Amino acid sequence: MITEIATIRIDPAQADAFEAAVANAAPFFESAKGCHSMSLEAVIETPGVYNLRVLWETVEHHTELFRSSENFKQWRALAGPFFIEPPMVVHGETVKQYF
């Protein structure tokens, strides 16, 4: 499994509307091939910064299949207007689970 972490910066005054937009976009992730989970975390120390965490079967499920899909277009139509800058996206893979 691959974890996508997208760090998203928005205007803190728009937090409630942004969170609602992400909630409305959740079905687009849920129905995406290879997507196993999606969550949104607010960064406590920095208002207006969020980490979107998505668990994918492979990197390609995210970068090739999802990003070229109608689901991605719908996600960006809902959440994209809130972005102050393009999200910073990284992919990680667990190498060891300790507990």
Image (cartoon, rainbow, N blue to C red):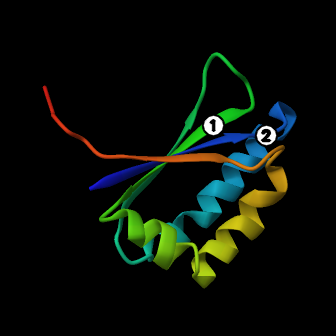
Name the residue tied to disc 2: 10
Image position, residue 24 (x, y; %): 63, 64
Image position, residue 67 (x, y; %): 57, 73
Residue at 64% across / 56% down in the picture?
Answer: 22
Say if mark 1 contacts mark 2, CB within 8 Å: yes
On residue 50, the disc is 1
Image position, residue 94 (x, y; %): 24, 41
Q: Which amino acid does label 2 sit on?
A: Ile
For the residue carrying disc 1, how many other residues have a C-alpha within 10 Å: few (<14), some (14-19), or many (20+)? many
On residue 1, the disc is none
Residue at 61% across / 20% down in the picture?
Answer: 44
Query: In which quarter of the view is residue 73 placed?
Result: bottom right
Query: In which quarter of the view is residue 43 placed?
Result: top right
Horizontal relation, residue 56 to residue 18: left or right: left
Figure check: 70 above or below 37: below
* Residue reaching furthest to the bottom: 70
Pick whichever, 60 or 70, lies toward us.
60
